[in-house]
Amino acid sequence: MTSRYAVAPAPPAGPGMTPEDGAIDHYLSELARWRMRREHELGALDALTRTHDDRDALNIDVTASMTLWHAIAQRHDLLLSTWQDAQAGNGERDWIAQLIWGLLELPDGDAEALAIALPEAVRLSDALAASLRARLHTDDDDLPFDQRVAALTADTERVRAQLEHDREAAGSAGGDERDDARLDDANDADHPGDDVTERLSAVEAEVEGLPGESAESLATVGDLESRLAAIDRDLIIAAATQAHARATTDQASSERDHLVAKGEAVRSLAERVLNTVHPAPRLGIPDVSALGEVPEGEDELTAYMANLERVGRALDQAHITYAAALAEYADLADRAERLAKTLAGCGAPTSVDLAGMLTAAKESLHNRPADIQRAAALIAAQEAYLGELRPDA
């Protein structure tokens, strides 16, 4: 069934596998489409939340969803940059897999619970968005009852399969009873004391027993959609917490390889910025290899993991800074295009040579590296003048 909402694309290969070129192209294209659709969805949900009676509680989930989307968008940018370099012969294709399956550290105060790989982050975004839609009742009048039930049935099957997959993964990774407990203790605030398996089984039973369409059954479907989205969300976070809690040499090696790939992607982004804009930020980008090889001792391993986290945070900061420089350039280019359309509609000369200023601004942007300070000053001056000339514009 084709969804009208953004749905997480399947990763091009599993963890530890190098994806084929065609699969990478397809995944990056699908992720770009997902990214654009989810941004629009979150904008619409944010607008609905502002007028909702429960807006204070809903705003927490909207903010979390937007934070998650932003982290995913940043990783997508790094993937695109790395893939372009790899195709040009300036990078390693193996780094693509590292960036897909390496952990995203989300700035939300709980590093363990939110340290998840890109595919899980995208699926978590789907779950958060589904929960918000259910709580806001955005689907009540848009989708026929039978289609909502069919979609709910398909989602319960998907979540059940994911739960079984996570249990198998925990077992194959040498998990113990505590690992299973972490999955079973993925509790939702509305269901204290119920483990995730029992909650999912309850939803499955209620879906199977749904009566025909009525006002009561419609309300039940909405409740089930919200509960299933919460289960999906909690399952993802529990599995991520479980993986993060096992500090092993294999985990440290995997994280080190991920940061090596991420460091190269950030260096590629930095070079692009330096070639595109002036003045450009100049930040030191840490070299992961300077940490040395992964140690064997428990104490040394704990310290090594802490150092990896510090390097990861430094790479994140460099990424944010360089990405912001490109975003500023893109914003100036958009503003220049809007000015061109506005000037074309003026139809009358003014006492200021706005057309000449616009030409100078565009020249500043088209140069390499672009003089963004000059362009910004020219564009701001034109916008201010037109604001006085045409206050209704």
Image (tube, rainbow, N blue to C red):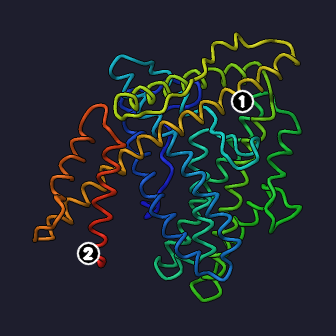
Disc 2 residue type? Arg
Residue picked out by circle 1: 309
Q: Secondary structure at mark 1?
A: helix
Q: Position of residue 366 (x, y in %)?
A: 24, 39
Q: Secondary structure at mark 2?
A: loop
Question: At x 67% / y 52%, what residue is drawn?
Answer: 160
Question: Horizontal placement of 160 versus 333: left or right?
Answer: right
Question: At x 42% / y 54%, what residue is drawn?
Answer: 36
Image quadrant of residue 302? Answer: top right
Residue 258 visible at all: yes
Which quadrant holds the C terminus? bottom left
Q: Which mark is residue 239?
A: none
Labels 2 & 1 near each other (Cβ < 8 A): no
Residue picked out by circle 2: 390
Question: At x 58% / y 33%, what residue is drawn?
Answer: 101
Question: Horizontal placement of 9 versus 296: left or right?
Answer: left
Q: Position of residue 146 (x, y in %)?
A: 51, 75
